[in-house]
Amino acid sequence: MKISPAVVLFTGLATFSVAAGDITGTVTLQGTPPAEIPIKEIKADPFCGKLVTDQPTTRFFVVGPNKELGDVVVMLKGISGKSTGATAEPVVLDQEKCLYVPQIVALQTGQKLLVRNSDPLLHNVHLTPKEKANETANAGKLNLPQMEKAPDLVYTFPAPENFLRFQCDVHKWMFAWVTVVDHPYFAVTGPDGKFKISNVPPGKYTITALHRKAAPNGIDKEIEVKEGADTTVDFTVELK
Ligand SMILES: [Cu+2]
């Protein structure tokens, strides 16, 4: 049988995509986190107070019934210049009921971050990058008011940076933390503590799990992604 070039090309692509693997795992917390603090200012605020029925609290530790830990950034280390951020879907950081949602965000270098105001009131978006390149790239947008129904504010970051801080100067309790990664191999754990990093090429890697309060510098593990196979790696974040 004669094989057409198109079939050869298709088979080649299929083989390539099968070779990559997913990395999945669960992050759990060991130890008892401090109690979250009620943000009484939200209830007391004449505008924000109307938007909430429950008493919002800080969200330092998002912990499940079996100590699953959410809001952990898991990423491969030692990879640079592999960002697909320029063509990736933008990431939304919303302001809802006078809180940032989500509070922990990760995105790639060059990927758009849309900061949205879903509230019927004024917020002020104030970011303080530590990497000079991230500051320079957003000059003029580092401290801006955002009115009700105003268009999204759009940011991009050229340099990797962990936990770049966003805050609102109108509502002093509002913080979000944005981690910028120079490749697509990262994830943030959900409230179930689980993460999934897709399409990782085979190879040996250092993978790290960062929690802003309990593991800000990351917990490293060595892993190997074998051709066409999925890899599981779990992390335990210890409270000291
Ligand atoms: Cu605000």
Image (cartoon, helix red, strand yellow):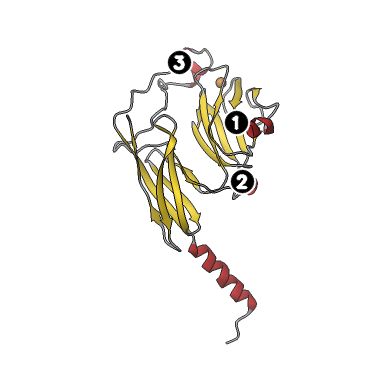
- Residue 163 in picture, x, y percent from top left: 51, 32
Residue 99 in view in this figure: no
Q: Amino acid at mark 2?
A: Gly
Q: Residue at x 44, y 31 (%)?
A: 212
**Do tag 2 and tag 1 residues touch (Cβ < 8 Å)?**
no
Q: CA distance from mark 2 to mark 1?
A: 19 Å
Mark nearer the viewer, 2 or 3: 2
> What residue would you read off at disc 3?
43
Q: Amino acid at mark 3?
A: Lys
> What residue would you read off at disc 2?
85
Q: Quadrant of ligand 1?
A: top right
Q: Is residue 151 above or below residue 199?
A: above
Query: Which quarter of the figure is the N terminus placed in?
Result: bottom right
SS for dot 3: helix
**Do tag 1 and tag 3 residues touch (Cβ < 8 Å)?**
no
Between 215 and 165, which is closer to the camera in this rendering?
A: 215
Mark 3 crowd level (few <14, some 14–19, many ≥20, 10 Å Cα): some
- Residue 61 in picture, x, y percent from top left: 38, 30
Residue 181: name its quadrant. top right
> What residue would you read off at disc 1?
116
On the picture, is 194 further left or further right than 175?
left
SS for dot 2: helix
Q: Residue at x 64, y 37 (%)?
A: 156
- Residue 109 in picture, x, y percent from top left: 61, 42
Q: Amino acid at mark 1?
A: Arg
Q: Is residue 35 above or below residue 153?
A: above
